[in-house]
């Protein structure tokens, strides 16, 4: 499986979790304590972490946490990154097994979005002078990973197609299926229904690009 195929299947669920995490964190600042294995946001939120990797701004490159020998990182914080490496070995995803590579190939956000969908953990990008560290949070409130409401589903679909080159149909089908929606698919459209009674219709043009979103919302 190529990374682009995996990305199309998982980017939207990862994005949904990021939007939900942003609702929780708001504008709080962040601190990362590797010794404690925790990230603190503001003065009131604290979560366990699993390190994913880091971006170098100067070299424009990505380095997986499991490959960061110079960082002397606590092994207990590498479980998620090594799980993804093992997943990549099983599925033939080279980006998960190569220690580092240029950001043009896959940057931290793209890697972390896929990881979020696969593992059920949202992520945070912590910038520092010269780069950024990406880590996943454990023990976040259940609403961060809960199935999205229809209005958030629309937001996710719109943000994905605006931000990333991705197969629109694969992304839409995978996302709504992962969220527990029932799908009826034709060459021209996907009609999706969620357990609340909401219905979404997603139309595609002749090139498979998302061309129209419409629907009715169920009761809250």
Image: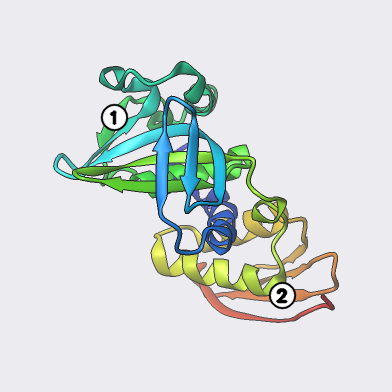
Residue 129 tag number: none
The reply to whether residue 113 is visible in this rendering is: no
Q: Is residue 134 left or right of residue 87?
A: left
Mark 2 neighbour density, 10 Å: few (under 14) some (14–19) many (20 or more): many
Q: Is residue 20 left or right of residue 97?
A: right
Which residue does the numbered mark 2 point to in the structure image? 200
- Residue 66 location, x and y as percent? 39, 22
Residue at x-position 59% and y-position 60% = 20
Image quadrant where residue 130 sits:
top left
- Please identify, in this view, whether the residue under mark 1 or under mark 2 is nearer the observer: 1
Answer with mark 1 or mark 2, whichever residue precedes in sequence.
1
Q: Are marks 1 and 2 in contact (CB under 8 Å)?
A: no
Farthest residue to the front: give it.
43
Q: Taking 90 as reference, is 215 above or below it?
A: below
- Residue 174 location, x and y as percent? 64, 53
Q: Is residue 137 left or right of residue 140?
A: left
| CA distance separating discs 1 and 2 | 40 Å
The reply to whether residue 27 is visible in this rendering is: yes
> Along the line of sight, which residue is nearer the eye, 24 or 84?
24
Image quadrant where residue 181 sits:
bottom right
Residue at x-position 47% and y-position 54% = 42
> Along the line of sight, which residue is nearer the eye, 139 or 164?
139
Which residue does the numbered mark 1 point to in the structure image? 100
- Residue 148 location, x and y as percent? 69, 62
Q: Taking 123 as reference, is 144 above or below it?
A: below
Residue at x-position 47% and y-position 28% = 81
Helix, strand or loop under label 2: strand
Residue at x-position 51% and y-position 72% = 158
> Along the line of sight, which residue is nearer the eye, 24 or 201?
24
Q: Quadrant of the C terminus?
A: bottom right
> Along the line of sight, which residue is nearer the eye, 33 or 132?
33
């Amino acid at each position: 499986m190529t990374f682009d195929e995996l990305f199309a299947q998982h980017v939207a669920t990862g994005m949904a979790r990021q939007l939900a995490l942003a609702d929780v964190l708001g504008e709080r600042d962040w601190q990362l304590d590797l010794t404690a294995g925790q990230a603190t946001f503001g003065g009131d939120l604290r979560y366990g972490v699993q390190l994913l990797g880091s971006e170098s701004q100067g070299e424009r490159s990505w380095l997986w946490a499991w490959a960061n020998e110079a960082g002397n990182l606590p092994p207990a914080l590498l479980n998620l990154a090594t799980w993804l490496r093992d997943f990549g070995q099983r599925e033939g995803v080279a980006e998960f097994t190569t220690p580092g590579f240029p950001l043009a190939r896959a940057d931290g956000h793209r890697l972390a979005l896929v990881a979020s969908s696969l593992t059920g953990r949202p992520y945070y990008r912590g910038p520092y002078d010269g780069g950024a560290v990406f880590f996943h949070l454990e023990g976040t409130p259940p609403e961060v990973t809960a199935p999205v409401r229809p209005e958030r589903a629309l937001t996710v679909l719109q943000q994905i197609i605006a931000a990333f080159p991705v197969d629109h149909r694969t992304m839409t089908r995978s996302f709504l299926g992962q969220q527990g929606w029932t799908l009826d698919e034709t060459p021209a459209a996907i009609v999706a229904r969620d357990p609340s009674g909401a219905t979404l219709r997603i139309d595609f043009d002749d090139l498979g690009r998302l061309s129209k979103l419409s629907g009715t919302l169920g009761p809250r």
